[in-house]
Image (cartoon, rainbow, N blue to C red):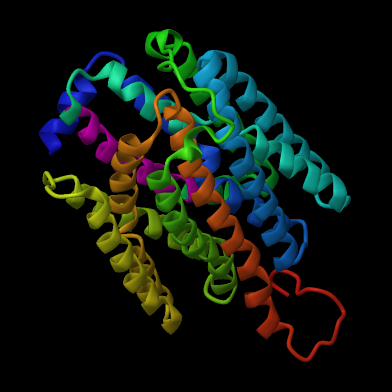
Amino acid sequence: MAAGYLEILRTRHAARLLAGTLVGRLPNAAGAIAVVLFVRAEGGTYSLAGALAAVYGVSNAVGQPLLGRLVDLYGQPRVQLPAALVSALGMTVFALTGIGSPGLAYALMAVAGLFTPPLEGGLRALWPSVLSREGQVHTAYAMDAVAQEVMFTVGPLLVTLCVSLWSAQAALVVLNAIGVLGALSVVVSRPSRAWRSAPREAHWLGALRSPGLVALLGAFLFVGIALGSITVAGVSYADGHGGDATYGWLMAALGFGALVGGTVYGARRWSGAPERRLRALVALLAVCYLPLVLVPGVVAMTALVALAGVFLAPCIACAFIIVDRHAPRGTVTEAFSWLVTTFTVGASVGTGLAGPVVEGPRSYGRGCGGGRKFGK
């Protein structure tokens, strides 16, 4: 499979599209973490951090299929780059204004999330036009899932590095500036400029008129909930076990586990129905999350978090094939964007629920005087 990856990367435009898309998706990979650390630096509560991250995530979830449908209708450059600029502007203003005005903070999170460009769906729509064989496209899906975990490994470390060297405010700005550069790299490429969606049947449900796709989305909602809960719970754990550095390593370990699992998964060609395979992968993912409730020391916890991530990339790679099989004609970008949306909604629910849960035991007996401050 490594040879298959190299064959794809040697294909004209493939490496540039993959790299540009990964860089453009960096705010997705570490945006929630950056928001949580920024709220912490501003003296906000766990509940506020979780709520702002949830608003960002839910708005992202709403915007992805809407923007994805616009991409199917009008092409990638006319949608992706303007959306990236508006999203980055919203997050930058949030970094400059802080949490002093909660209403403004929530509004800016909504803008930043709503206009996050659907680069994931866009890349998966581009693969068939860049690669000549169906087998190469399936290999590209696996490579995409593995490469995505590189960003989920690098993203948290980049954010914590920026926080350590400069500030949480600078981390937010840098993260989104890099994202805009990635989106720009994609939309100026020849495949992105030339791509057009297949003719589509007019239907208000769009890609959601496919029962198979709807079933897949339901499963990935719960996968997202599990992943999202770690974002806030990891901060709570790190506050008592070494602070920001520990948090960065925990999030990087999660991405590293997924990277290893995705590489192993992509090392063989699978037979049989991908739907059946996905059910087994999701069950294994759930089993690997259970040891986290032991809450051991930092080294053991980092190892357990890595284990929790092992089956994440295989689940995603398998889901890509299922989306491709079930997406109605002319809705491919929208269909892939719905997968991103469902995963993001689940992650946002997870972060929103985890904030009060980790805050509650620490503030027990303190009455109704408000949420616990970070590190207090």
- View extreme (bottom): residue: 365
Q: Is residue 348 magenta?
A: no
Quadrant where the C terminus lies?
bottom right
The percent coordinates of residue 180 (x first, y second) are 57, 25
> Which quarter of the picture shows residue 60?
top right
> Which quarter of the picture shows residue 134?
top left
Q: Main secondary structure of the magenta part?
A: helix
Position of residue 135 relative to residue 163, above or below, is above
Residue drawn at (55%, 14%) of the image: 74
Residue drawn at (77%, 62%) of the image: 44
Residue drawn at (73%, 88%) of the image: 364
- Left or right side of 289 for 259: left
Residue drawn at (58%, 45%) of the image: 31
**Magenta segment boundaries in residue numbering:** 136-156
Position of residue 234 relative to residue 148, above or below, is below
The percent coordinates of residue 231 (x first, y second) are 54, 61
Position of residue 2 relative to residue 44, above or below, is above
Residue 38 seen in the figure: no
Q: Is residue 148 magenta?
A: yes
- Left or right side of 168 for 106: right
- The foreground one among 210 and 53 is 210
